[in-house]
Amino acid sequence: MGLLDLEKHFAFYGAYHSNPINVAIHVLFVWPIVFTALILLYFTPSLIGFNFHPVLHLNYGFFSTVFYALFYIALDKRAGSLAAFLTFLCWFSSSFLANSLGFSLAWKVALAAQIFCWTGQFIGHGVFEKRAPALLDNLVQAFLMAPFFVLFEVLQSCFGYEPYPGFNTRVKARIEADIKQWQDRKQKKLS
């Protein structure tokens, strides 16, 4: 799979997220996972030896935000730019919240939110999707792509967004083929 092959990435993601309730759960819970992960990363040391701002530090949180933002823009300029903006907004606001809460309270808040959001997603997969989460098959794709794809899903369903003509049709065909292949493998295991 090409690193910047948006169709292939979105088809992989879509094959694990075809149930509307599971999709809604992911739309609600993926970005809070990003936000609370950045709260935890706020407390990592600066990677350049000093902090240019009393609250905004150039640490693992900042550099992971830059990586995610640039990757999303490389995948699709328009939707990726919005995802990059949201990623930086999460970093900015999580830094101020983490600074305000302090380490002893921030990690508790972040941990509680992470547990709640991850539990919701696993319930979405187990109860509604009836398929294991994508992270069990491709951990990197799941962690790297999930924030972008839930945003992409919202843009697609609410505004009919397509990065280029025919994208949605081709991805839908790939998703249906992937789901059929998974169902066939599942049926063979049962027989």
Image (cartoon, grey):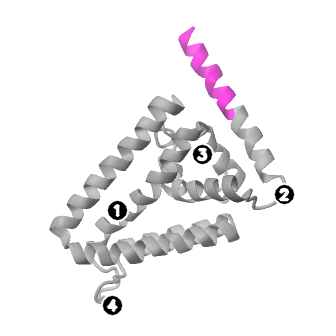
What span is in magenta?
A: 178-191
Q: Position of residue 1 (x, y in %)?
A: 66, 49
Spatial CA distance of label 1 from label 4 is: 21 Å
Residue named by callout 4:
53
The part of the image, by quadrant, that contains residue 73 is: bottom right
Binning the other alpha carbons within 10 Å of mark 4 as few (below 14), some (14 to 19) or many (20 upward) gives few
Residue assigned mark 3: 13
Q: Earlier in the sequence, mark 4 or mark 2?
A: 4
Going from N to C along the chain, the mark reached first, 3 or 1, is 3
Kindly tell me whether residue 181 is visible in this rendering: yes
**Mark carried by residue 84:** none
SS at circle 3: helix
Residue at image point 48% right, 35% down: 125
Residue closer to the observer: 49 or 8: 8
Q: Is residue 7 magenta?
A: no
Q: Is residue 39 above or below residue 169?
A: below
Are the two marked residues, 2 and 1, in contact with CB atoms closer than 8 angstroms?
no
The kind of secondary structure element at disc 4 is loop
Expressed as whole percent of the image width and height from the top left, the position of residue 124 reads 46, 37
Q: Is residue 5 visible?
A: no
**Is the residue under label 3 in contact with that under label 2 (CB below 8 Å)?**
no
Residue 165 shows which numbered tag? Answer: 2
The total of numbered circles placed on residues is: 4
The amino acid sitting under disc 1 is: Thr
Pick whichever of labels 2 and 3 is earlier in the sequence: 3
Label drawn at residue 36: 1
Magenta-drawn stretch, dominant element (helix, strand or loop): helix
